[in-house]
Image: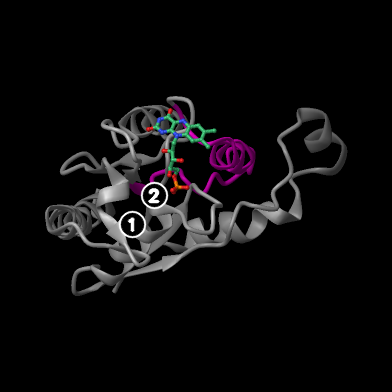
Amino acid sequence: MTNVVAICGSLRKGSFNRQLMNASIGLAPQGMTIKEGPSFAKIPLYNFDDQQATGIPKECDPLHEAIKAADGVLIVSPEYNWSIPAGLKNAIDWLSRYKDVAFKDKPVCIQSAAPGLLGGSRMQYHLRMSLTSVDAILFGKPEVIVNMAASKFADGQLKDQTALDLIKQQLAAFAKFIERVKVR
Ligand SMILES: Cc1cc2nc3c(=O)[nH]c(=O)nc-3n(C[C@H](O)[C@H](O)[C@H](O)COP(=O)(O)O)c2cc1C
């Protein structure tokens, strides 16, 4: 069984991205399990002085451990001001300070949803750059970018058939990608 840990970049209750993540959890192909990982909500803001004084905060450990234990990571996130939401970036910054960086050699797949036309694509590009810096192995295509989100979600669920089909295709390709990365 391939185990994927999912991270949602939004803390908002009615988050489109959380709904997208939940849809993906339900659409995992046979042989893959996707589980939501520990939240980054309580991780303090990164400060090098704090790291030197008291080390990496214990609030980071659950996410670090979950990523280490997983075969792959699915990050589903909104775009804030054309980039990565601060909470998610803050978590990546702390996780990059462990001796055994959890993202190193880890296959990572990205999805985003946004009410606008670009659907969070600029966040995806920036996230790729940050994750390359921590030696993650980024899955390429197909990309899942759910734009015009307000018209594609209803009753807490993703309703758009094109997007649902694309998620299935992406996750099936991600499963194969993880297998290829494993045997390297
Ligand atoms: C601080 C902030 C910045 C935002 N910047 C962008 C942006 O650059 N691009 C974009 O497509 N949407 C932007 N939005 C709108 C979000 O895409 C929208 O609020 C979305 O619903 C957030 O994702 P969520 O529903 O998963 O919480 C921004 C929203 C906030 C709160």
Q: Where does label 2 land, which residue?
A: 76
Q: Are marks 1 and 2 in contact (CB under 8 Å)?
A: yes
Tell me what residue is drawn at x 69 percent, y 48 percent.
43
Asked if the stretch drawn in magenta spans residue 109, the answer is yes
In front of the other: label 1 or label 2? 1
Q: Position of residue 144 (x, y in %)?
A: 23, 45
Say if 167 sits above or below 55 in the image. Answer: below
Q: Which residues are magenta?
A: 83-110
Please, what is the three-letter code of the amino acid marked with disc 1? Leu
Q: Is residue 182 magenta?
A: no
Residue 76 lies, in percent from the top left, at 39, 49
Which residue in the structure is indicated by mark 1?
20
Q: Residue at x 64, y 52 (%)?
A: 41
**Spatial distance from mark 1 to mark 2, Cα to Cα?**
7 Å
Q: Nearer the viewer, residue 119 or 142?
A: 119
In the image, 107 versus 113, the foreground residue is 113
Can you tell me which quadrant of the image ligand 1 is in? top left
The mark nearer the N terminus, 1 or 2, is 1
Label 1's element? Answer: helix
